[in-house]
Amino acid sequence: MMECRPPLHRLAVKLTRGGRALMSEEEARAVADAAMVTAWQRWDATRGVPFAIYARHWVRGAVARALRAARRQAPLDPFLVSELVVTRQSAERVALARLLLSRVPPEDRAFLAEHHLDELSFTELGESYGRNSAWAYRRHRRIVATISPPDQQPA
């Protein structure tokens, strides 16, 4: 388990880069350590899955849950664009994104942030909301339809 620790710590820190204000590197490492303990307790070597791969999924899920919890408690909106996003995209695109997202209710903005910024799949989103992946996919399409121009709405 100890040889897995540094790569899984790096993964935890990498996953928190988009939410630096929400979780420090030390907090991410602590979440990763707790996830590794849980993974170690539940890992079954007879199934043939290496521990590092098994633990990676536990760490990724734990960090994502911690970020979601922090985002829900944080007073700042996840779509108040950070310096990291501004350096990657032009100011014009950022302004357009802010304008479009101002039409979306805060709970839908949080949903979009979890999918696009935290890179959660529809399956992971569905599970986090106590639903299934089809529900998450439909919700995403509905939200995108509210901010898409009429001629560009999905079929």
Image (spheres, grey):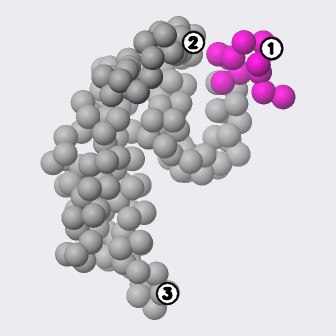
- When the figure is inspected, residue 137 is found, relative to residue 88, above or below; the finding is below
Q: Is residue 145 left or right of residue 124?
A: right
Of 20 and 90, nearer the camera is 90
Where residue 144 sits in the image (x, y, percent)?
A: 66, 24
Q: Residue at x 22, y 75 (%)?
A: 3
Residue under circle 1?
151
Instruction: Quote the CA–CA distance across marks 1 and 3.
Output: 50 Å
Q: Residue at x 78, y 27 (%)?
A: 154
- Are the residues flagged by discs 1 and 3 in contact, CB closer than 8 Å? no
Of 114 and 85, nearer the camera is 85
Residue under circle 3?
47
Amino acid type at mark 1: Asp
Q: Residue at x 35, y 24 (%)?
A: 87
User: Which numbered disc covers residue 85?
Assistant: none
Q: Nearer the viewer, mark 1 or mark 3?
A: 1
Q: Which residues are magenta?
A: 144-155
Residue under circle 2?
100
Amino acid type at mark 3: Arg
Amino acid type at mark 2: Leu
- Are the residues flagged by discs 2 and 3 in contact, CB closer than 8 Å? no
